[in-house]
């Protein structure tokens, strides 16, 4: 019997807004409506067993940034610098509004 693909739980840990970078480097006037990413909420959780497509409601740009860690964790990989096996911490690459995620292999 083939081994099943493990599920992953992806949790939103932190959201940031780098206002200084926006003020200095953003091409358009962001105004007061621009802040931390509004796609995710801190503590929000997603569960998936699909490495190629994001779960419903998950930002496709963030998914593309996390996909390497998702694939490695799902395939049974463990990051040697992490205290816990089957766990990765990753971030989307939006320099103005980064979001940090915890990726966990579900047992």
Image: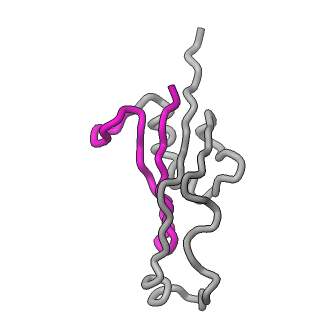
Estimate the x, y position of residue 69 in percent, counting from the top left.
46, 44
- x 50%, y 38%: residue: 71
- x 55%, y 72%: residue: 36
Estimate the x, y position of residue 86 in percent, counting from the top left.
42, 33
Measured along the vertical axis of the image, is residue 5 above or below residue 24? above
Which image quarter: residue 85?
top left
The residue nearer to you, when weighing 43 against 10, is: 43
Main SS category, magenta section: loop
Colouring method of the image: one colour
Left or right: 27 as drawn, with respect to 100: right
Left or right: 66 as drawn, with respect to 57: left
Which residue reaches farthest right? 56
Which residue reaches farthest left? 81
Which residue reaches farthest top? 1
Q: Does the magenta stretch include residue 93?
A: yes
Estimate the x, y position of residue 67 in percent, counting from the top left.
52, 47
- x 46%, y 71%: residue: 95
- x 47%, y 86%: residue: 25
Which image quarter: residue 5?
top right
Left or right: 92 as drawn, with respect to 29: left
The residue nearer to you, when weighing 41 against 72, is: 41
Q: What stretch is highlighted in magenta?
A: 78-107
Measured along the vertical axis of the image, is residue 23 above or below residue 98? below
Total labels: the figure holds 0
Measured along the vertical axis of the image, is residue 5 above or below residue 14? above
Estimate the x, y position of residue 57 in percent, counting from the top left.
70, 53
Q: Is residue 84 magenta?
A: yes
Task: Locate the N terminus by quadrant.
Answer: top right
């Amino acid at each position: 019997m083939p081994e099943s693909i493990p599920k992953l739980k992806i949790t939103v840990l932190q959201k940031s807004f780098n206002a200084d970078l926006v003020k200095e480097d953003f091409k358009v006037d962001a105004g007061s409506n621009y802040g931390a990413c509004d796609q995710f909420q801190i503590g929000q959780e997603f569960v998936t067993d699909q490495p190629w497509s994001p779960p419903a409601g998950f930002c496709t740009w963030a998914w593309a940034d996390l996909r390497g860690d998702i694939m490695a964790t799902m395939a049974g990989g463990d990051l040697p610098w992490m205290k816990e096996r089957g766990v990765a911490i990753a971030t989307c690459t939006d320099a103005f509004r980064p979001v940090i995620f915890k990726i966990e292999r579900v047992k």
